[in-house]
Amino acid sequence: MMQTKEPSFNGSSEVAERVSHSATSDRPYKFVLKGAAFFFGAVVLVFVWSVLQAAWPALRQNGFHLITGTSWVAGGNGPFGAFALIADTLITTLIALLIAVPIGISSALALLFLVPPKFRTIGASLVELLAAVPSVVYGLWGLWYLTPWLSHTVQPFLAGITGSQFPFSGPQQGFSLLLAGIVLSVMILPTIVAISRDVISVVPVDLIEGGLSLGATRSQVFTKVILPTSKTGIMGAIVLGAGRALGETIAVAMVIGSNIQMPKSLFSTGGTLASTIATEFGDASGNTGAALAALALILMVITASVNAFARVLTNRAKATA
Amino acid sequence: MEVVTTKTEVTTNMPTTKNEIAMQLKDVSVAFSGRTAVRDVTFDVEEKKVTSLIGPSGSGKTTLLRSLNRLHDLTKGAVVEGQILLGDTDIYNDKLPTTLLRSRIGMVFQRPNPFPTMSIYDNVVSGLRFNGIKKKALLDEAVESSLIAAALWDSVKGRLKNGGTTLSGGEQQRLCIARALAVEPEILLMDEPTSSLDPISTKAIEDLMGELKNRVTIVIVTHNMQQAARVSDNCAFLLMGDDRAGELIEFAETKKIFNNPSDPRTLDYIQGRFG
Ligand SMILES: Nc1ncnc2c1ncn2[C@@H]1O[C@H](COP(=O)(O)OP(=O)(O)OP(=O)(O)O)[C@@H](O)[C@H]1O
Ligand SMILES: [Mg+2]
């Protein structure tokens, strides 16, 4: 060490001693951290491996039919074609986005620019509250309050628009892809509001004032300056919302009518990948268990890629802000 | 916009006599949440001249400048008192829409702020589009004339489709000047427009101001005393009073402020004794 070669004033050797002491006392800490990280990695690997293993019989039996097949015979040995489930998953998510994105972005803008400061915190807590409500509560709410409202009001109204033709055809019983989408839209709203608010709030004031000083109205500043500037981040918010909607299980299972069939309209009952796993897991006859594990695998691949995409977008938004 | 051309004729008709007044400040005070930042400022902004605002940091130069195009309207708790007349119009009390006011009084900011999602072309015409002008021929014409006026045309005419933020800092600032000029404002407010730029870009923008004087009235805030002396015709010196609110100490021709100021505090400041 330094101080042995160059005899220096007292203070420095004391400091060096302390530094080296703290370096040694760091070691157990580092060890624990590394161990924890290793353990975590191992858990992930074991987890993925066991899902794969559970799904293997179904994968071997059905092959690509698992994704493209349109018939799903529950119980016994299939065939297990999850096309309808994948379609329902995407349709309900799309409905949720169609509702939640415009409302979410407008709410974020309103929270940032229109609402007086003292209500802003109330708005923010409200958003957090909505985010913290457990899914099953949304499910119950959909079941008790939205089902009758849908079958008495919304569905007759929509059917009236198209003359009971696609996409608003079929029995008006409440439970439907439409209802699942509506419940999901409420569930992903807080995500979209919170994240788009965050990315919009980092749009430099310079740009906003630049727009205003050229004679822009407030709404022009929103649409021509703020939204384009935070586009990437808002896309990230939307994709994160989509990720949540794709994987939502119990609330969807409670309102979608749990019925595996090819969707014919938005009024059809159905089942998403996640909701079907939740409703069918008790039935382990034949290869059904393996088929459900295969659904889990498909769902994991979809949500993992969507979340990775969202991460790329939000990171890029942060980098450019 | 027509107003500009008629007024040009007035000035050329009487080249040597006293100039027209573009804007009058009468006892202008600005307070933020009850705390006064500038107090009772009164002076006239002469048309087609450069008026500089100088003074130490915190003396309220920016605050005063931003009151001239009502940019404080967005700030909760900001109150502007007194009268600011644009021609005969009291900009705070008469029913002049702020959007119209701001297209008559342009602004260039301390840091270049081109819209990052827009091309050079779109940046220049953004103000025109905000004001509802859509005709391609008009926009094309405005792009060329504004970029020429901002001394940027030759270097960017081949890459108008490129992003506005691909330019260098000095070019970006000239782009922002072009963007402001495209709306054909009567007055151009500039808040330390060269403080984030290198000496060469600074020189380019100072030269530019000399030429712009022929078409637009300029009010510029600057920390750089030589710059104020070089570019401005009239000069307002602000200084914080005892309660730290900025006050106008002296307003005069720039020559007088720098050679023979009436107030000893002005002399102290321009000789670098505080601030
Ligand atoms: N939005 C605001 N809210 C509260 N106070 C403000 C606001 N803007 C400015 N002030 C206050 O007004 C006073 C004058 O500030 P201003 O920015 O006008 O000074 P300046 O002369 O431009 O200084 P500088 O040379 O550093 O730019 C300062 O005390 C500042 O804190
Ligand atoms: Mg300032």
Image (cartoon, helix red, strand yellow):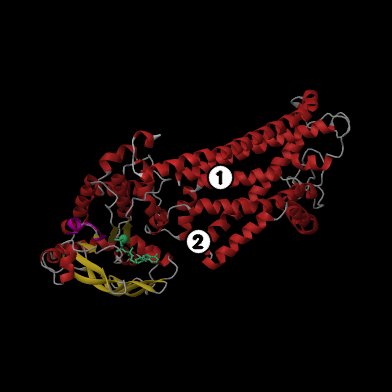
Q: Quadrant of the N terminus of chain A?
A: top left
Instruction: Name the residue: 61% across, 40% down.
Output: A307
Which amino acid type corresponds to the residue marked 1 in the rendered image?
Answer: Met
Specify whether B67 is left or right of A265: left
Chain letter of mark 2 equals A
For residue B27, which quarter of the picture? Answer: bottom left
Mark 2 element type: helix
Q: Are marks 1 and 2 on the same chain?
A: yes
Q: Is residue A81 above or below residue A232?
A: above
Contact (CB < 8 A) between labels 1 and 2?
Answer: no
**Magenta includes B225?**
yes
In magenta, the rendered stretch is: B218-228
In percent of width and height, residue B268 lies at 17, 66
Q: Which residue is mark 1?
A: A235
How many other residues sit within 10 Å of disc 1, few (<14), some (14-19) or many (≥20)? many
In percent of width and height, residue B159 lies at 34, 38
